Structure formats: structure tokens, C-alpha cells
């Protein structure tokens, strides 16, 4: 387990300042904030509101010795594995999704011991970000007790000073960088989402550097028109990237559904060719950049996915 | 009922265990179908919660979500929150039922969904806990639903992803798990529970046409037998119809064979 560094993370935030300036930049410029050896937390969950434009930009950089954490990870993990970027995965679940069976590339690396997988419970991942976001070194909880998950991670317990009960002490996680995809942001980094927030708020507040991509860059006035939709204030955000369809081929709540046929093709290739298929995917799709990837998908496909989303929204 | 699949049989059996005016924490796939079936048949006030942060979802027949975090899962929902928050509702005691599947389950209801074989060099690395560990730790009553096969019903799980009654007796409480109980294990062969003193798995009732010997043959450990061994009612035409409509969408007019 990585060591708990909540005070150091706080000192960095204290020192960083809170300049309310134009933070817009390209995905390639923003992703330079990620260094070799960093812990990168990826927002969204499974194939929902994954910051895919930022993920593609990071894949292209071929960083090394990264740790990636996510609440539930999808096949983007396999892409990082195939490029040799990862030393460690921190999550509660890694797959593609129910219909696609066991993830072949993930299995290849984990079963050979070529990557460490710190498996936490789903809530424990959430509480790790939450403790980091709260600026405390751990949070007590009643989950994970008695399991081999706890034993393997050497999870510690605390005794309640009031009742004497024993609780699991889930350690804070302060990622070096959080990548988040949102519906709207202004140039200062006030960020709004519709629908699910997944673990994004705690993840971003815990992180030392926060990069946000947004479907739409809007004016501060548009943010102020619906302040209840704002999930992150500008002073918690370091970079803002305009990325329409920035979660594609994953879904973005209310905007577009997931491209499940694209998943089918990837899963079939990965099953047949293993890591080589995942690497080929990166070279063909991520390396040319997310904008080219969208162009290759074509406007008809994107429009159909937008129609899928429309059908599901409350009337 | 000869054309009823094992998945249908398990979902229908599980749905009957869900009562009205309760809250069920369901996963995608069979648990969601079982919960939907209960809601559409005998438990109209059953609230379905999904770990993506969804409270009170409705189901769009034929378009059920395959991830608890996708838009489809929120169709008709009463409230959307975040993932951590949903599990904190469970920790607070609001969720009456939790549903789990199992790659392996042992006689004390411990579940493995992490690794087959040695932990650090596994033969098969499975995706992992997801919310399963939290569900079994925090929900009021847990229902385990899985196909009845010797490779699943094992003497000892390779890894305890989700703790049941650990080594039986009061060992679960001694580990600090003060809440939650394992209510039932639903399979395509039987309905089982856990004997209150030893916490060992016990055969309660058989699926129609199944014998005790058959169940024993498919179980990798010694099963206790209930004194009041029962036979489950076969799925009714209504249950099958509602289940299939939820899964496949509104029934179409059958095409007659030429």
C-alpha cells in the first residue's frame, strides 16, 4: 500500500495559491502535468463519464511506473497495461462489463505478477478518496473486516474511544493527478455535471493536481445560473480542456450512450490477441488523438448515441 | 416449465423472498431482474437501489442496464447521489436486502470473486469485489444467488472476498462485523439457509423435481438438512411472463412454425 500523505498534500494545496485565471489548455498540454511514477486517479466509473480524451492523451505520452486508481475500471486499464505504463492498479473491480466476460489483457498481466493489483472494496475506495478530500489520514468504517482483502492489504483497525468497538481504518488516498470529465466548465474551472457524480468530487478534492475536460466551455454567468449543478469550485481545478464527446466511446449522462459495438470489437480482439490487440488499439485510436478518433467514428454513430441518451432522460 | 432456464428459475425463486415496502440493493443481471419481477408482481413498493448512486429506479423492459453506473440504470429514478453515499446508506442500516453472486461459496457463506488458485500467482484473476464485500458487510439481509455446481460450492474458498459467517459460530461478530446476516442461498437446485448455531449451510427446500442426492452431488461439502424440508412451487406462467418481458421487452406475437 502507498503511504498516507495527507499533510503533505494539504501543504501543497496551501502553497499552490488560488489564482482565478483562465486555465484552458489543450489535452496534450494539460496531460504534461502527469509525471512518471505518479498516481493518476481516473474519474467516472466503468464506462460512464470516463475522461477518455484525457486518457488517450496520457496513453500517447507513454509514461512509466504509473499507479492508476478508479472506482470500477474498464478496458482503459488494459490499454495502459499494454503500453507498459502501469506498476500498480488500485480499484475494487477491473473488467469491461458483464457481457464481455473476464478481461483477457488484465488477466495476462496480473496472473504473471507483472502489475500489482490492490483490490479494495468499492466503499473502501470511496472512503480513501473521501479521507483524502477531508484532509484526514483515515476514516473508520464497518466494511472489509474479516476478509482476505483486508489481510492482503494489511488494513489496520481502530478502537472507538467512545464505545470500544473495533472498526476498519481506511487510509486516505491523495492522488498526484485526477482526470475528470464533466458536462460544463468555465475557463476558471468551475465544473458542473448532470446525473451521477460517481466518486469524482472526493477524488478531485483529494488530488494534488486536477485536470478537467468538459463537453462544453461555458461563461461564468452560465455556471452561476445553475450553481446547484456545480460539483467543483474553480480553486480545486488546475486545468480545463474543451472536449466535446470527451468520454466517447464511454457514455456521458444525458448526452450520449456508450458505444457497445465498439466494446464488442475491442473485447473480441483482446480475447484473440491479448496485449498485442490492446497495444494496436492504442496505436490506431489513442496515438492520433481523441479528435481523430471521433472523426473516424463518424457523425452518424455519434448522433445515434446521442439519441439513445435522449430517450432515457426524464421528460 | 420444462423450458425455464436455470437463470430464470433462480431469479423467480429469489424474487419471492423480497417483500413489499422494503429496500433492495441489487446488482445488474439476475438480481435486478429478480427485484424487478418482485416489484411488478407482489411488491409494488419495493425500492430498488443500485450502487452507481441510484435510489428507486424503474426498469425499462428490454433495456435493462448492464452496468450499475450507466444512464439506463437511472431510468425513472427517485434520487441520484454518488457511489460512496449509497454504501453509507447501507452502513446506516437502510437496505433490507443485498444480492450477491459467487464464483465460489463455502459452507459458511464466505464468497470468493477475486482469485482462483494462489493469491499472488492466481490461476484465474477475477475482476474483484466491486461492492460485494460492502454488501455482505453492511446490508441487513444478504441473498446469495448462484448456480449449483461443485466448482462453486467448495469446502474452502481460495480467498474470502466477501465474508459470510467466516468459520461459523460467532466468528463473524468477533471479526467486527456486528450487523448483517446471510438470509438465503438460492440456486437452480435448491433454497438453502444457515443453521443458527453453527452457521453452516442448510438445505431448506428443493426446486421442483430435484432430489436431496442431486443437491449433495453438486455440493463440495457436507450440507445440513432442515427438519422441515420443503419443495418450492414451480414458476408460474405469470412469473415467467413478467420476467421475460423485463429481460426482452414487451412480448411480440409469436410466429407460428410453418
Image (cartoon, helix red, strand yellow):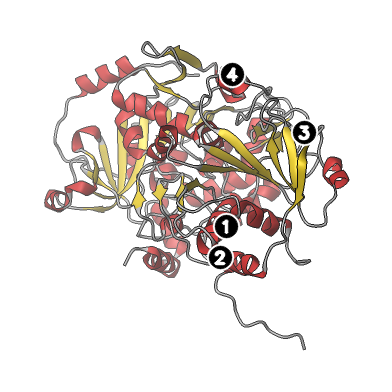
Q: Which residue is mark 3?
A: B154
Mark seen at residue B246:
2
Tag 4: Cα neighbours inside 10 Å, few (<14), some, or many (≥20)? few
Residue placed furthest toward the front:
B228
Q: Which residue is mark 4?
A: A151
- Tell me if residue A271 comes above or below residue A152 in the rendering: below
| Cβ atoms under marks 2 and 1 closer than 8 Å | yes
Q: Which percent across, then down, holds residue B156?
A: 75, 27
| Cβ atoms under marks 2 and 3 closer than 8 Å | no
Residues B258 and B33: in front is B33
Mark seen at residue A56:
none
Tag 2: Cα neighbours inside 10 Å, few (<14), some, or many (≥20)? many
- SS state under label 2: helix
The chain under label 3 reads B
- Tell me if residue B257 comes above or below residue A197 in the rendering: below
Q: Nearer the viewer, mark 4 or mark 3?
A: 3
Q: Nearer the viewer, mark 1 or mark 4?
A: 1
Q: Residue B1 appears in which quarter of the rendering? A: bottom right
Q: Which residue is mark 1?
A: B33
Name the quarter where the C terminus of chain A is drawn. bottom left
Q: Which percent across, then down, holds residue B45?
A: 44, 56
A262 relative position to B202: left or right:
left
Tell if the residue under mark 4 belongs to the same chain as the one under mark 3. no
Tell if the residue under mark 1 belongs to the same chain as the one under mark 4. no
Tell if the residue under mark 2 belongs to the same chain as the one under mark 3. yes
What is the distance, in whole Å, between disc 2 and disc 4 at their CAs? Answer: 41 Å
Query: Measuring 46% from the left and 62% from the top, which residue is drawn there?
Result: A297
Q: Which percent across, then down, holds residue B179?
A: 51, 29
Amino acid at each position: 500500500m502507498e503511504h498516507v500523505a495527507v499533510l503533505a498534500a494539504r501543504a501543497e494545496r496551501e502553497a499552490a495559491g488560488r489564482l482565478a485565471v483562465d486555465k484552458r489548455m489543450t489535452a496534450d498540454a494539460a496531460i504534461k502535468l502527469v509525471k512518471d511514477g505518479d498516481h493518476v486517479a481516473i474519474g467516472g466509473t466503468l464506462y460512464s463519464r470516463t475522461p477518455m480524451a484525457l486518457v488517450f492523451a496520457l496513453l500517447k505520452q507513454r509514461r512509466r511506473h504509473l499507479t492508476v486508481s478508479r472506482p470500477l475500471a474498464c478496458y482503459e486499464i488494459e490499454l495502459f497495461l499494454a503500453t507498459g505504463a502501469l506498476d500498480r492498479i488500485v480499484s475494487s473491480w477491473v473488467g469491461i462489463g458483464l457481457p464481455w466476460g473476464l478481461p483477457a489483457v488484465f488477466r495476462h498481466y496480473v496472473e504473471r505478477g507483472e502489475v500489482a493489483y490492490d483490490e479494495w472494496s468499492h466503499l473502501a475506495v470511496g472512503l480513501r478518496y473521501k479521507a483524502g478530500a477531508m484532509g484526514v489520514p483515515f476514516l473508520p468504517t464497518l466494511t472489509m473486516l474479516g476478509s482476505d482483502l483486508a489481510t492482503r492489504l494489511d488494513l489496520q483497525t481502530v478502537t472507538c474511544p467512545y464505545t470500544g468497538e473495533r472498526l476498519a481504518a481506511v487510509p486516505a488516498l491523495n492522488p498526484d493527478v485526477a482526470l475528470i470529465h464533466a458536462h460544463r466548465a468555465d475557463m476558471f474551472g468551475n465544473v458542473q455535471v448532470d446525473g451521477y457524480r460517481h466518486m469524482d468530487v472526493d477524488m478531485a478534492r483529494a488530488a494534488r493536481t486536477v485536470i478537467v475536460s468538459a463537453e462544453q466551455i461555458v461563461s461564468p454567468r452560465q455556471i452561476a445560473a445553475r450553481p446547484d449543478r456545480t460539483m467543483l469550485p474553480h480553486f480545486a481545478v488546475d486545468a480545463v480542456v474543451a472536449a466535446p464527446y470527451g468520454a466517447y466511446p464511454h457514455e456521458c449522462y444525458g448526452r450520449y450512450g456508450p458505444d457497445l459495438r465498439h466494446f464488442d470489437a475491442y473485447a473480441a480482439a483482446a480475447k484473440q490477441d491479448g496485449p498485442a490487440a490492446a497495444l494496436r488499439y492504442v496505436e490506431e485510436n489513442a496515438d492520433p488523438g481523441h479528435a481523430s478518433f471521433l472523426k473516424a467514428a463518424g457523425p452518424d454513430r455519434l448522433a445515434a448515441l446521442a439519441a439513445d441518451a435522449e430517450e432515457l432522460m426524464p421528460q | 416449465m420444462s423450458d425455464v432456464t436455470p437463470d430464470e428459475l433462480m431469479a423467480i425463486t429469489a424474487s419471492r423472498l423480497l417483500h413489499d415496502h422494503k429496500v433492495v440493493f441489487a446488482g445488474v443481471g439476475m438480481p435486478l431482474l429478480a427485484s424487478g419481477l418482485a416489484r411488478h408482481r407482489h411488491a409494488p413498493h419495493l425500492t430498488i437501489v443500485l450502487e452507481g448512486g441510484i435510489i428507486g429506479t424503474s426498469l425499462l423492459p428490454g433495456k435493462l442496464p448492464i452496468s450499475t453506473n450507466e444512464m439506463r440504470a437511472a431510468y425513472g429514478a427517485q434520487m441520484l447521489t454518488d457511489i460512496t453515499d449509497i454504501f453509507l446508506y447501507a452502513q446506516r442500516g437502510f437496505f433490507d436486502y443485498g444480492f450477491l453472486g459467487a464464483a465460489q461459496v463455502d459452507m459458511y457463506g464466505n464468497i470468493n470473486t477475486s482469485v482462483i488458485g494462489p493469491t499472488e500467482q492466481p490461476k484465474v484473476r477475477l475482476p474483484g469485489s466491486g461492492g460485494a464485500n460492502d454488501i455482505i458487510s453492511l446490508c441487513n439481509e444478504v441473498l446469495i444467488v448462484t448456480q449449483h455446481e461443485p466448482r462453486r460450492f467448495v469446502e474452502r474458498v481460495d480467498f474470502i472476498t466477501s465474508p459470510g459467517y467466516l468459520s461459523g459460530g460467532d466468528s463473524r461478530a468477533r471479526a467486527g462485523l456486528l450487523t448483517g446476516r446471510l438470509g438465503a442461498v438460492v440456486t437452480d437446485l435448491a433454497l438453502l439457509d444457515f443453521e443458527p448455531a453453527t452457521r453452516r449451510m442448510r438445505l431448506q427446500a428443493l426446486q421442483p423435481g430435484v432430489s436431496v442426492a442431486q443437491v449433495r452431488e453438486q455440493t463440495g461439502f457436507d450440507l445440513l438438512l432442515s427438519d422441515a424440508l420443503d419443495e418450492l412451487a414451480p414458476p408460474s406462467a405469470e412469473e415467467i411472463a413478467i420476467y421475460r418481458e423485463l429481460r426482452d421487452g414487451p412480448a411480440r406475437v409469436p410466429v407460428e412454425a410453418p
